Image: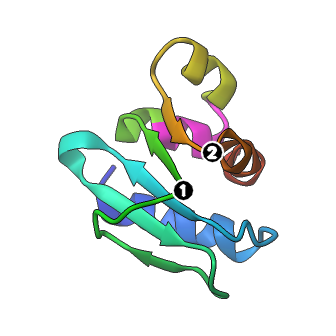
């Protein structure tokens, strides 16, 4: 799965979700970064490495599993496959938005 397809999936999920009013960075390591500025409506999504209130770091495969419902984000977090830096409150909101 490419970074572009992940970016499209994030756009789709955020389009139908309640506004989270925060900045979020999805760090996929060598695969790249997706930065979401959801303080605006609609959210602005880019591949910039900017400061964010919450950063989620994982592999693209783990993230796609979360998006399609085959990977529980809570279990991924407990197993160390998903790392969260910053606001856990924003991370919990994202949990509900991104899950399959």
Residue at disc 2, secondary structure: loop
- Does the rendering let one see residue 72? no
Q: Residue at x 74, y 42 (%)?
A: 92
Residue 69 within the segment the image draws in magenta: yes
Task: Please state the total of marks drawn on the protein image.
Answer: 2
Q: In the rendered image of this protein, does residue 21 appear above or below residue 69?
A: below
In the rendered structure, the answer to whether residue 24 lies left or right of residue 92 reads left
Discs 2, 1 touching: Cβ within 8 Å: yes
In the rendered structure, the answer to whether residue 3 lies left or right of residue 80 reads left
Kindly identify which numbered label has been placed on residue 53: 1
Where residue 95 appears, x then y in whole percent?
71, 43
Q: Residue at x 59, y 38 (%)?
A: 66
Residue 68 within the segment the image draws in magenta: yes
Q: Farthest residue in the left direction?
A: 30
Q: Farthest residue in the top direction?
A: 79
Where residue 78 appears, x then y in whole percent?
59, 14
Residue at disc 1, secondary structure: loop
Q: What stretch is highlighted in magenta?
A: 63-70
Among numbered discs 2 and 1, the one appearing first in the sequence: 1
Q: 6 and 36: which one is in front? A: 36
Q: In the rendered image of this protein, does residue 27 appear above or below residue 24?
A: above
Q: Which residue is drawn at 25% across and 41% down?
A: 29
- The picture quadrant where one finds residue 81 is top left
Q: 38 and 31: which one is in front? A: 38
Residue marked by disc 2 = 87
């Amino acid at each position: 799965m490419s970074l572009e397809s992940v970016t499209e999936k994030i756009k789709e999920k955020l389009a139908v979700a309640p506004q989270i009013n925060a900045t979020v960075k999805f760090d996929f390591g060598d695969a790249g970064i997706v930065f979401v500025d959801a303080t605006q409506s609609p959210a602005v999504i880019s591949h910039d490495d900017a400061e964010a209130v919450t950063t989620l770091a994982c592999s693209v495969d783990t993230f796609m599993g979360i998006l399609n419902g085959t990977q529980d984000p809570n279990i991924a977090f407990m197993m160390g496959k998903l790392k969260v830096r910053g606001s856990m409150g924003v991370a919990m909101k994202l949990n509900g938005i991104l899950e399959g």
